[in-house]
Image: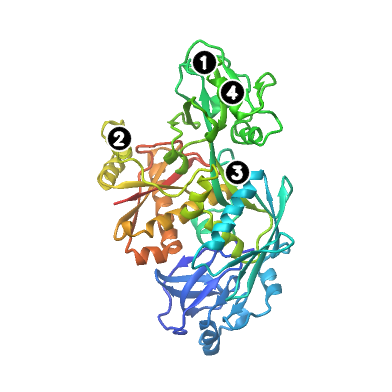
Amino acid sequence: MLKRTITTLLCAASPAALSAQEVELRSLDGFISVAGEIVDYNGTMLSVNTSVGVVSVPASEVGCYGAGCQDVLANNDFGLDAAAFVEVVTGESKEETQAAAATSSGSSDVSADLSLSFARRNFEDLFGVVAGTYLSEPGTDVDIRETDQGLVVLSRGATGEEATLRPVGVGTAGDINIAITSLTGSAEADFPDVTGWALTGPLTHQMVGLTAFAVIAAPDTGVTSVSLDDIAAIYAGEISNWSALGGADKRILPLQLPENTDLRAEFVTTVMEPAGKTIAGNVLTMADEAGIAASVGQFPGSISVVSLENTGENELLDVAGSCGRAVAPDVFNMISGAYPLIRPIMARYNTLPSNGLTPALLDFASGDVVQAALQEEGFVDYSAVQLDPAKNNARLSAIMSAELSDAAKPAAATMFERLFDAERLSPTLIGGATSGPESGWNRAMFKTLAETLADDAYAGRNIFFVGVAESSEGDQSAIDVSEKAASGVEAAFSIFAADVIASNNLQLSSYGFGPVAPVACYEGQVAGNTHSRVEIWVR
């Protein structure tokens, strides 16, 4: 396993060129990929002159790919030999280094034959859309085929790499499991900073799809929004009258799906478990979402949580996280992560792949071609979109009348000045230390952002990485954390999408505005006093 403590470092290196030939240095799990000319080797770290400057990577964690590797080893100016790499692939032959790769990874359970399981039947269809679209994508150097035994084989002819995925059906354990993965609740930090999920890996999760719950209620409740805690308390039987939420003096009638349904289980993991509550025994159960949607429109005081596509003609309530800031269930709020009841569909690695073919396939799921196809299957397309300019203006205009602390006032003035004529894009990153699911979300945002910014419409534009945060330690702490988060994400993206930035002449910069003009609860799964988000704005 690639050590999580290793980071990709931008550093000054010797200007002496080892070779005029370009090479690609790539980790076996696919999350280090640096192309350029090797300019230095100190016995541990290789320095590579890339399109964004000199980048250093650990030689023992990467393979050398390309015809240039042969020249590099022949010159041997810095004592560099094939044994320094995990493997060497010149394009003509591939060294037999699988044993060395397993030793370097520090893991004995890496396998090229990974089983693939699905939490729900339609996630098999989702994977089929991803694989089928990847197969037909022009320009890819990876072939996909299905064997008579039902195995999905990925192969790269130029290097001889191969990965085999073995679908094992629904509800069984697999090396890779595709399932709804909540971004609420608590989780351990898998990555201390942005370099892990963006550059070095290995990832524990990759996001491949998105869906969402919606809260529907009878028209006589007298409320327009509820919080996640409110919903959990209603279903736990702790809140039984709408007047307790500022609504009508009317008994609450919650409706739910049967206990053995996937959606009921997802509701429990998304809403009830993070609140530490269980569903009361007297909650009315109905057979399907269509029946629930029809009943909510007829039963006084009723409420339910259903899939976004099955809300019927009912009123949708805004939903707030623990901070009480309500967010409407519109598309922008869902794909920016502001709406609390999104349900990301993640591929979780229980066993790490032995090369980068499988991660590359799952990364491809975040492209707009796949997302458009998945929308046809009832999923939410999370490709990047622009926020309605009127909503941008309303948010910035609110700064002028807001009550701000002395620490926040300068940040507010800068925010207004920098963003008043900019447009916000939907990709929004979770800042700071992140859990595996949060990191899967972030990487998907990087993928869709890079694809969007490659469009000619963004040529020569200024791209702002804007940090926002809330802290129990005060506004200055929030500002400091948001600045650090934004600058870190900007630096990582400059490497992640170096080709896009160079070819489209993009100008990147970062700012941190802390608690100024928040639009959602900036909660995170990793415990801490401060949580941050990084928004993307374009001018």
Corner quadrant of residue 406: top left
User: Mark 2 vs mark 4: which is more N-terminal?
Assistant: 4
Amino acid tagged 4? Ala
Rendering coords of residue 84 (x, y %): 60, 78
Cα separation between marks 2 and 1 = 31 Å
Residue 291 in view here: yes
Query: According to the image, label 2 marks what residue?
Result: 394
Q: Is residue 114 above or below residue 286?
A: below
Sequence-wise, the earlier of marks 2 and 1 is 1
The residue at the point 64 percent across, 63 percent down is 1
Residue 121, quarter of the rendered image: top right
Is residue 401 or residue 464 the one in the foreground? 464
Q: Position of residue 176 (x, y in %)?
A: 67, 54
**Dot 2 lies on which element?**
helix
Q: Check the image and report above or below for 74 versus 482.
A: below
Identify the amino acid type marked 2: Ala
- Of callouts 1 and 3, which one flags the residue occurring earlier in the amino acid sequence? 3
Residue at the spot of label 1: 242
For disc 4, the marked residue is: 233
Tell me whether the residue at label 2 lies in contact with that at label 1, contact meaning CB atoms closer than 8 angstroms. Answer: no
Residue that mark 3 sits on: 181
